[in-house]
Image (cartoon, grey):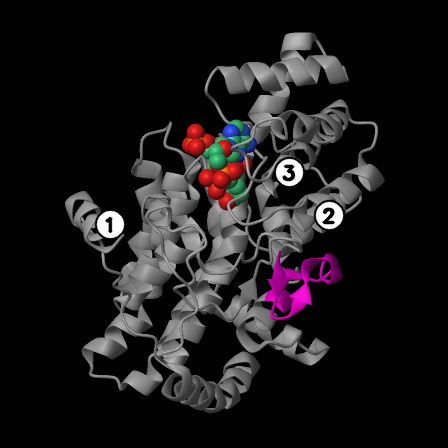
Amino acid sequence: MSKLKDKFTGLIQPMRDDIRAFIKEHGDKQVSTVNVKQVYGGMRGVRAMVCDTSNVPPDKGLVVRGIPLKELFDTWPEDIFWLLCTGELPSDDERKDLQDEYKKYAGVPDYVWKVLEAMPKDSHPMCMLDTAILAMEGESKYRARYAEGMKKEDYWEPTMEDCMRILAILPELAAGIYRLRYNKGPRIAPDPNLDWGASYAQMLGLKDPDGIFAKLMRMYLTLHCDHEGGNVSAHACHCIGSALSDPYYAVSGGLNGLAGPLHGLANQECLKWVIEVMDKFGGAPTKEQLEKFAWDTLKAGKVVPGYGHAVLRITDPRFDAFLAFGKKYCADDPVFQTVSNVFDTVPGVLRQIKKIADPWPNVDAGSGALLYKFGLKEFEYYTVLFSVSRAMGMCSQLIVSRAWGEPIERPKSSTTEWLKKFVADNY
Ligand code: CMX
């Protein structure tokens, strides 16, 4: 048994007992109310689901299992997955065991490459990634065990096994998609001596003589790991998983949500916006030029990508981490300087628009400039990097929900007619 499985096994019964006792004693206590605006407004702020892997206080940003993200900036992604699942950071020994598990589960099957090679040459890399994960569904241990009549208490175990397989192949799969989609030459085989993040960096095949890109990749994969349960991708994955669809279905489905421009795709849109403004003004623009470009974007009815958030009301700490990394390693780079100047300018513009609840940068505002600097210039690929990391959050959330026995998700919808009648009858 892997050390992660072993550790998690010990956590399950206390977690089940705790949740069951809590529901039994306090099940009828009210935690949230819902008004008409929220019903029509994407359920914003409605507390109606559980996620114990992380939470996002609006004034703090991501907190992973009680640890604020700013204390985790230098943590390796392997440690983050362990933390998400167990609530504790691993020892060196435990991290090594998890890395060995990834190696055990590694290896993208040939048929997956054939599926990807058969897709149209201009397929979006997110569509390729999600298709590839779905194509592997036949491997699901969860589905096989369910068909054999596995007991409900055991659901988490093959869920974890499927998740380990998905996480183990993701860097190789994502790097292979990069090389195939952008004609970068043959795929690069994984180096078994490298960690999860460095191995992904190496398989992308970009020049990295000083190992700084590998460092960036580790940080990138750490920062994007999870963002509580209600965001589109986590929620989609969770909802699919609640029907007991296996993790291949659920993670692929969740990542389809990440591919939306209001969510994970904003990182491709963001750097595009920065490059457009630089092209327009022939280099790093002045503050006045940036302000005008932001206003022009807004007047054209478009969003300024990378700014605003459904939950956060501060500068995203993930943005802070990228900004600090950029200041350390690429302070002279004009694209990075522009990103930094956008940060000094755009919030002042967005603050003047009353309806915008959060004028501050989110995670997507800073990462692209750094990737660009290290030669990863294909914007459309950026959400794939986000996905490799976010799969850790999705997988850990699936494992935890299966472990405590969360039921199928089924909120009640209403027709507009019903809502109008309800208001007329009751107010
Ligand atoms: N530029 C222009 N308008 C913005 C804006 C921005 N950056 N942020 C919010 N608004 C607008 C909304 O579009 C909305 O307008 P309408 O009422 O006309 O539809 C209004 O302000 C109110 O929105 P809000 O309550 O502040 O924000 P929401 O919770 O509705 O939406 C988000 C949040 C992220 C979708 C929105 O801020 C946005 O579109 N930002 C730009 C895209 C982006 O960066 N997305 C990535 C988010 C991080 C992630 O999930 O990966």
Tell me the crowding category of disc 2: few under 14, some 14 to 19, or many 20 or more residues within 10 angstroms, Cα based.
Answer: many
Q: Does the residue at mark 2 contact the one at mark 1 (Cβ under 8 Å)?
A: no
Amino acid type at mark 3:
Pro
In front: 133, or 369?
Answer: 369
The furthest residue to the front: 427
| Mark sitting earlier along the chain (2/3) | 2
Q: CA distance from mark 2 to mark 3?
A: 12 Å
In this rendering, position of residue 190 left or right of residue 243: right
For label 1, the SS is: helix
Tell me the crowding category of disc 3: few under 14, some 14 to 19, or many 20 or more residues within 10 angstroms, Cα based.
Answer: many
Q: Residue 371: where, in percent of width, then height?
A: 65, 36
Question: Which picture quadrant has residue 91?
Answer: bottom right
In front: 378, or 226?
Answer: 226
Q: CA distance from mark 3 to mark 1?
A: 38 Å
Does any portion of residue 384 appear in the rendered image? no
Residue at position x 63%, y 23% from top?
274
What residue range appears in magenta? 62-80
Residue 262 in magenta stretch: no
Beta carbon at label 3 within 8 Å of ligand 1: no
Tag 1 residue:
423
Residue 77 in magenta stretch: yes
Amino acid type at mark 2:
Ala
Tag 3 residue:
361
